[in-house]
């Protein structure tokens, strides 16, 4: 064998070994891919040709007590992209068409690299014109899909907005909250009102569609489908037409109104003025719209019926009168001489009527709201006994209504002042508390539940927003029938009797009630001009018709002045509208103005 042949033989042998080595390496790689990593690549292959599409669950509908829908479901579309199909070279095109910064798109896609087949939402709230535009350009936008979620349309706009609430996506705080760990970050959930408190019931369960797609993302066939389960409907206790009438009666005034069904505690109307349009939150508001709401000094997002606490003023005299009678410290015939003020040390505690009321008994003291009379009743009771009776009326505690962030109000006593003010209790504090001033504070809902006990004969019902639930009695007021009749007669005289402070609520219907004028600042004599923010709050609580009450309510007008002038006319309008809805006017018509003597007999 020549040297040349020997070299050729060695060369072919090397090439042969090289080919064998390459085949061995290929075989090892195939073994690795098919045996060691076969399941993983099979899973990726399946995911690459399969697409899981979520089917949103229709949210339960919220109805009023007459089965009138207050909301309806509406589709909410957004543009998404499948990260695994996304082409970064097309980022500029995505940015231009969706009007989103390129950096934002790349950041969202980058965060989802661990879930390459789960769609990433890029733009929310796209309309039908935008959908048509995007669909026509899908071939230029690899991975782009249009997804849909169920949102809300609030049919009556801002009416009952503080009751119904609104939907929204999870906030950053909620995302970190373990209570929301099972809720996808991008779905709509209840964020306020009934939508929030009954979210689990209303939300339902979403479904899924598993579809096979080709390389272009076009659907080939449906492989599996799980139908969504619609959320449960809810029927509220409010009457939406009556609600609108109550809102209209308020006009542009700031304040609150709560109307109850006396025999169940069902809420017939709940008004917090000003209101807001919940559609803005669900559809997405502009920065200008958000600034307009958040910078509004009237605070339309505040639910004044349960979140604001006000000094009750003279409506609290109802409690003081009941306590004095039940403790046998006063009688209906007890007369007290009102000269316009009383003195306590160097202090003077005045009556609202300059010059005083003269000699007044309990009936006149309630009808004309004599402060001096109730100063004396408070002195005889002492604050601890007075506070005990107030708490029996449910004051100073949350009512338990199905709304979030309810305040408890304040019913002070000696221990309360020591704990909160680090001071002893003085008789002057009792004088103020006896007429609903000083440290005493109520929510409008608490005021409504208080007067409701007189409408139904002494039962303290838990207020509810749900129709036809089993009424929950929180307690029964320990009150003799005689006490009940005496105070009820006085309340009737407030509206219908001579000198009654609530005469502006006088109606064809027999209305009983109590006015209240709550001071915002104590010493106003130093101010020549009283700005609106320092003017008194106006209260009126009432029920009607007296012989068989079908509605009880509280009205609070912030900085409205006198209760008889600002709040009582609203109550009259609202009561007349409710009675018009429930009964023809002739059923309980009372055209005769009853005299003071007849007033004293009306409750017998």
Image: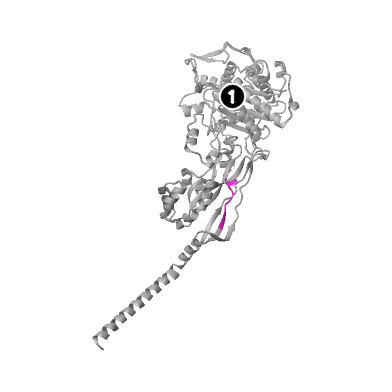
Report which quarter residue 382 is drawn in. Answer: top right
Q: Say which residue appears at 60% left-offset and 20% top-offset.
A: 565
Quadrant (top left, top right, bottom left, bottom right) of the C terminus: top right
Q: Is residue 345 visible?
A: no
In percent of width and height, residue 3 lies at 24, 85
Extreme left residue here?
3
Count residues near mark 1 (Cα–Cα under 10 Å), then give few for <14, some for 14-19, many for 20+: many
Q: Nearer the viewer, residue 364 or 476?
A: 364
The range drawn in magenta is 197-209
Residue 584 appears at what percent x and percent y? 74, 29
The relative height of residue 18 versus residue 286 in the rendered view (above or below) is below
Q: Is residue 59 magenta?
A: no
Q: Nearer the viewer, residue 127 or 417?
A: 127
- Is residue 32 found left or right of 579 in the rendered image? left
Is residue 205 rendered magenta in the image?
yes
Q: Quadrant of the N terminus?
A: bottom left
Pinpoint residue 573: horizontal percent, then vertical percent: 65, 26
The answer to whether residue 564 is seen in the rendering is: yes
In percent of width and height, residue 9 lies at: 29, 84
- Front residue of 596/291: it is 291
**Residue to which mark 1 is pinned:** 539
């Amino acid at each position: 064998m020549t040297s040349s042949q020997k070299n050729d033989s060695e060369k072919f042998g090397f090439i042969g070994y090289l080919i064998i080595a390459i085949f061995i390496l290929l075989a090892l790689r195939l073994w690795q891919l098919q045996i060691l990593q076969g399941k993983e690549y099979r899973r990726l292959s399946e995911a690459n040709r399969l697409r899981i599409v979520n089917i949103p669950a229709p949210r339960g509908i919220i109805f009023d007590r007459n089965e009138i829908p207050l909301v309806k479901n509406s589709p909410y579309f957004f543009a998404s992209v499948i990260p695994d199909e996304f082409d970064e070279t097309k980022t500029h095109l995505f940015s231009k068409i969706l009007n989103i910064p390129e950096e934002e798109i790349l950041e969202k896609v980058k965060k989802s690299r661990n879930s390459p087949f789960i769609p990433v939402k890029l733009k929310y709230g796209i309309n039908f014109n935008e959908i048509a535009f995007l669909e026509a350009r899908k071939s230029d936008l690899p991975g782009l899909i249009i997804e849909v979620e169920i949102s809300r349309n609030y049919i009556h706009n801002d009416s009952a907005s503080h009751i119904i609430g609104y939907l929204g996506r999870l906030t950053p705080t909620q995302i970190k909250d373990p209570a929301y760990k099972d809720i996808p970050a991008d779905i709509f959930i209840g964020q306020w009102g009934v939508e929030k408190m009954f979210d689990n019931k209303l939300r339902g369960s979403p479904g899924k569609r598993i579809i096979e797609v080709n390389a272009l993302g076009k659907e080939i066939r449906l492989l599996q489908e799980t139908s969504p389960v619609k959320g449960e409907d809810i029927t509220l206790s409010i009457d939406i037409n009556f609600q609108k009438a109550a809102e209209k009666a308020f006009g542009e005034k700031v304040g609150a109104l709560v109307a109850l069904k006396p025999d169940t505690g069902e809420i017939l109307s709940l008004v917090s003025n000003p209101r807001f349009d919940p559609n803005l939150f669900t559809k997405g508001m502009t920065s200008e719209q958000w600034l307009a709401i958040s910078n509004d000094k009237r605070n339309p997002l505040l639910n004044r019926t349960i979140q604001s606490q006000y000094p009750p003023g003279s409506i609290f005299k109802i409690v003081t009168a009941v306590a004095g009678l039940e403790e046998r410290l006063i009688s209906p015939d007890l007369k007290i001489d009102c000269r316009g003020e009383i003195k306590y040390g160097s202090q003077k505690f005045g009556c609202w009527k300059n010059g005083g009321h003269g000699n007044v008994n309990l009936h006149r003291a309630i009808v004309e709201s004599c402060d001096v009379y109730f100063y004396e009743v408070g002195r005889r009771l002492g604050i601890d006994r007075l506070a005990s009776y107030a708490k029996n009326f449910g004051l100073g505690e949350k009512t338990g209504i199905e709304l979030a962030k309810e305040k408890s109000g304040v019913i002070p006593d000696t221990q309360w002042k020591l704990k909160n003010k680090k001071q002893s209790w003085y008789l002057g504090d009792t004088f103020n508390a006896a007429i609903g001033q000083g440290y005493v504070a109520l929510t409008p809902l608490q005021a409504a539940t208080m007067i409701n006990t007189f409408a139904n004969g002494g039962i303290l019902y838990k207020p509810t927003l749900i129709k036809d639930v089993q009424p929950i009695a929180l307690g029964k007021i320990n009150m003799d029938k005689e006490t009940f009749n005496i105070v009820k007669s006085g309340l009737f005289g407030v509206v219908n009797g001579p000198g009654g402070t609530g005469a502006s609520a006088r109606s064809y219907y027999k209305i009983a009630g109590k006015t209240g004028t709550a001071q915002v600042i104590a010493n106003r004599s130093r101010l020549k001009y009283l700005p609106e923010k320092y003017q008194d709050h106006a209260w009126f609580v009432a029920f009607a018709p007296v012989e068989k009450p079908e509605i009880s309510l509280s009205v609070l007008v912030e900085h409205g002045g006198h209760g008889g002038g600002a709040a009582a006319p609203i109550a009259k309008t609202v009561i007349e509208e409710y009675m018009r809805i429930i009964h023809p006017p002739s059923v309980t018509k009372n055209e005769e103005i009853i005299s003071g003597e007849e007033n004293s007999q009306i409750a017998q």
